[in-house]
């Protein structure tokens, strides 16, 4: 498995004056998504007005894969809530798709998993 190349600022280098804000930013949504990911085999987190969450859901429907969908706002609302998920996963766009507790990426990555047969292997 490749090593994550994304740089993350070291927690031991965060001053206590900033630590509470860093650690407490939108914790409710992260906890909600974590809970869904633990309980469901497939979770899609998306937003309205963005076509790619809908494409991901349609692809999963076509494959007969059950999933839990969580929509969070639109381009015009709840961007701060979605920002927390971007910070948590390191993924810059929506949808965010999780399979069996593993973050797999967005629509394009899901499409590749389906085409290669890997999605079915992950679910079996």
Image (cartoon, rainbow, N blue to C red):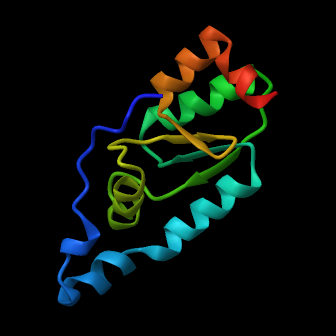
> Where residue 119 sits: x, y (%)?
67, 23
- Residue placed at 66% from the left, 18% from the top? 118
Question: 83 or 102: which is nearer to us?
Answer: 102
> Where residue 121 sits: x, y (%)?
74, 21
State which quadrant residue 55 falls in. Answer: top right
Question: 55 or 92: which is nearer to us?
Answer: 92
Tell me how many marks there are: 0
Is the residue 108 above or below the residue 106 in the image?
above
> Where residue 66 sits: x, y (%)?
78, 37
Question: 17 or 115: which is nearer to us?
Answer: 17
> Where residue 4 sits: x, y (%)?
35, 39
Is the residue 15 above or below the residue 101 in the image?
below
Left or right, residue 24 beside residue 106:
left
Do we see residue 79 in this rendering? Answer: yes
- Residue placed at 34% from the left, 60% from the top? 83
Do we see residue 77 in this rendering? Answer: no
Left or right, residue 40 beside residue 114:
right
Q: Which quadrant does the C terminus fall into?
A: top right
Furthest toward the top, the residue is: 116
- Residue placed at 46% from the left, 22% from the top? 108
Is the residue 41 above or below the residue 112 in the image?
below
State which quadrant residue 19 falls in. Answer: bottom left
């Amino acid at each position: 498995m490749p090593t994550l190349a994304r740089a993350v600022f070291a927690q031991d280098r965060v001053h206590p004056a900033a630590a509470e804000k860093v650690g407490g930013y939108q914790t409710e949504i992260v906890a909600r998504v974590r809970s869904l990911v633990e309980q469901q085999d497939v979770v899609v987190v998306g937003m309205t007005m963005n076509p790619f969450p809908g494409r991901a859901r349609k692809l999963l429907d076509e494959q007969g894969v059950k999933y839990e969908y969580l929509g969070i706002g639109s381009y015009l609302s709840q961007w701060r809530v979605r920002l927390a998920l971007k910070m948590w996963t390191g993924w810059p766009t929506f949808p965010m798709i999780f399979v069996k507790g593993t973050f797999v990426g967005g629509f394009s990555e899901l499409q590749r998993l389906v085409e290669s047969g890997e999605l079915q292997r992950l679910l079996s």
